[in-house]
Amino acid sequence: MIARARVLPLLSALLGAGLLAGCADSLFYRPGDDPVPAAAELAFAAESVRFAAPDGPELHGWWLPPTGASRGTVVFCHGNTGNIARHVGAVTWLPAAGYAVLVFDYRGYGRSAGEVTRRGTIDDAIAALDFALARDPHRTVVFGHSLGGAIAISAAAERPEVRAIAVEGTFPSYREVASTRFWPIGWLLQWLVSDGDDPEDGLEALPPRPLLVVHGDRDGIVPIQMGVALFERAHPPKTIYFAAGCGHRSPVEREGERYQRLLLTFFGEAIAAARPRP
């Protein structure tokens, strides 16, 4: 009885006074302070680029040019921990397959200015899509990992020119993943996460375009049921791929060429289907 008498007032205070919805949003963003190398210092060809969302801070990214004839452009939205130097390895194989790649940091990450917010990350991804579309207006797709997948879906919903969306280890709503990820306090924590601008909202607004949902069947960060729920809430055309034996990291690290072929086929077919007929 004594414990209960102490806990109930504490919960009431958390929910009703000091901790309002939205105060736990920062749990989704871990920029870190690792340095971002100059483009010239990288082991692969890259151009340092800067751009900004309207009324937003200046953002930094790398443009990886394709090797040989260009097949299209991929905008990559990375996960929540660390900057582009940590995540670029997931897409450095794409230029050799003929795709230009734009990797960029959200505001507050790496060399990008500003302070990270949920809506800000979406605006940043829209700015990245606009940058890529200006260079490749008819063959741009978006690819996101984890949090980056959530951001990619929301941004693509506002840019119908984007030909396809591929996401890895992504969830349908921020509150749902907080509830699952932070067990056993998730039931409380979910109410301290703000609502709105969720991936499921983006799916509802997304014009019909190919969507590929990828999820590792051993994902301990974003459980596989989150990927299934995301897929079920999406409109066709859509495809789901379960990466056997894979955790939360990109399946490309475990499956190599097999997974690369999956993405290349998906991107290539989507771009070909959307290509204007002569």
Image (cartoon, rainbow, N blue to C red):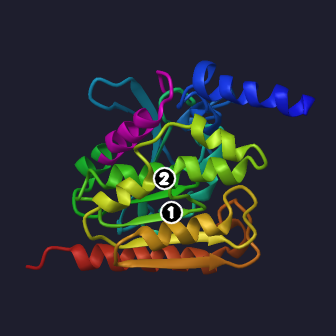
Q: Image quadrant for the N terminus?
A: top right
Amino acid carrying label 2: it is Ala
Answer left or right for 266 relative to 218. left
The outermost residue toward the front is: 1
Can you say whether 42 is above or below 18 in the image? below
Quadrant for residue 241, please give it: bottom right
Identify the residue position indicated by label 1 in the image: 167
Q: Where is residue 172 in the image (x, y as percent from the top left)?
A: 50, 58
Asked which secondary structure carries label 1, the reply is strand
Q: Residue at x 79, y 48 (%)?
A: 184
Is 195 displayed left or right of 56 in the figure?
A: right
Q: Position of residue 18 (x, y in %)?
A: 62, 18
Residue 150 marker: 2
- Residue 127: which numbered mark, if any? none
Q: Where is residue 168 in the image (x, y as percent from the top left)?
A: 57, 63
Residue pictured at 72% horizontal, 79% vertical: 244
| Circle 1 residues within 10 Å: few <14, some 14–19, many ≥20 | many
Residue at 31% over, 32% down: 53
Q: What stretch is highlighted in magenta?
A: 112-129
Residue 89, image x, y percentages: 63, 54
Mark nearest the camera among 1 and 2 is 2
How much space separates mark 1 and mark 2, taking CA atoms? 8 Å
Residue extending farthest top: 18
The answer to whether any part of residue 180 appears in the image is yes
- Residue 23 is left or right of residue 58, and the answer is right
